[in-house]
Image: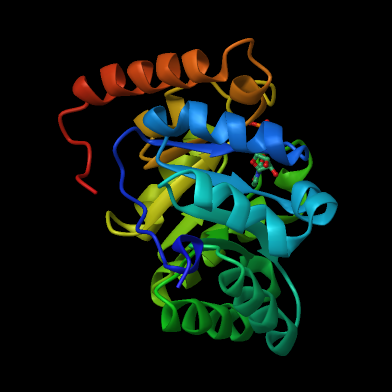
Amino acid sequence: MKSWDKRRALVNRTGIIHALDVDDLQRAIEIARQVEPSVDAIKVSWPSSMELGIKQVIPAIKESIKLPIIADFKVADIPVISTQIVQKAIKWGADGITLQGFVGEVTMKACIEEAKKSDAYTFMVTEMSHDGAEKFMQPNGEEIALMARKLHSYGIVAPATRPERTRFYRQIVGPDVKIMSPGVGPQGGQLGDAIMAGADFEVIGRRIFTADSPALEAKKSAEKIAEIKQKMPSIRAS
Ligand code: 3DU
């Protein structure tokens, strides 16, 4: 068995998941290595997976580092197709995968069960971070979060651009469901705000990989989050 073929646990050391939205493989590997000491996981997304190919992107990055990889594929199809997407992502090395809760309970249940067979974890998107998500996603976010809790999804995704909504979702899902929060940096979310609102992880992409030194930017971000956590006596252990 190759090293990328085994599931890796998501351990919360720094509270950062790096969105490695880079589609040059050598550069992606280089950045993954540089940020490894300061982040808890690498998230890959559709553009790099399409450009580099699913058979290459996760195995190549995962062989270069010891962190888990989350496939942010926001799975949103009928159950039979959605579970195939989950299966293939896991087959090609994903440790975790994101799902779109809005497609409903039958698909979500099937995907979560599929992931659990391989000890992979699921993060169900509630409300996205961009402008416009307020219209269709926000009104249904509470029910999606309740569904994630009921189905024992490992986690949910909640917006760092609206920390008050992340706080709300934390109340809905309780202390055990993990929350990852994208939207820090260019999207307008402030580093640390989502963690203060109850998220376990902040997802940081461009702010790190476009920096002159991704290593330094990731390190500074991790230090800031560590400082914030120290001031939060009630932070949940993960
Ligand atoms: O804005 P950034 O460069 O930090 O990247 C954010 C990443 O998180 C990117 O991969 C995007 O697809 C993902 N994401 C969101 O930005 C917002 C969501 O609600 C869910 C995922």
Location of residue 86 in the rendering, given as x and y in whole percent from the top left corner = 62, 75
Q: Relative to the observer, which residue lies in front, 7 or 196?
A: 7
Picture layout, residue 221 above or below residue 160: above
Residue 216 percent location from the top left of the image: 48, 13
Position of residue 167 relative to residue 38, above or below, is: below
User: Furthest residue to the bottom?
Assistant: 80
On screen, residue 195 versus residue 25, left or right, reads left
> What is the quadrant of residue 231 in the picture?
top left
Q: Which residue occupies the extreme right position in the image? A: 51
Is 73 on the left or on the right of 125, as rendered?
right
The quarter of the displayed image where residue 81 is located: bottom right
| Residue 190 position within the rendered picture, expressed as x and y whole percent measured from the top left | 53, 20
Residue extending furthest top?
212
* Quadrant that contains the N terminus: bottom left
Q: How is the image coloured?
A: rainbow
Q: Residue at x 76, y 47 (%)?
A: 48
Q: Nearer the viewer, residue 83 or 228?
A: 83
Task: Determine the residue positioned at 57% across, 13% down.
Answer: 213
| Between 167 and 189, the one nearer to me in the picture | 189
Instruction: Count every numbered label the image shows and give the total.
Output: 0
Furthest residue to the left? 233
Quadrant of the rendered image holding ligand 1: top right
Residue at image location 31% in from the left, 57% down from the top: 174
Relative to residue 112, is residue 89 depicted above or below? above
Question: Residue 160: in sight, yes or no?
Answer: no
Judge from the rendering whether residue 105 lies leftward or rightward of residue 48; answer left or right: left
Tell me which corner region of the image, top left, top right, bottom left or bottom right, holds residue 13: top left
- x and y percentages locating residue 158 in the rendered image: 54, 46
Can residue 62 be seen in the rendering of this structure? yes
Residue placed at 15% from the left, 29% from the top? 233
Please state which of residues 33 and 211 is positioned toward the viewer in this rendering: 33
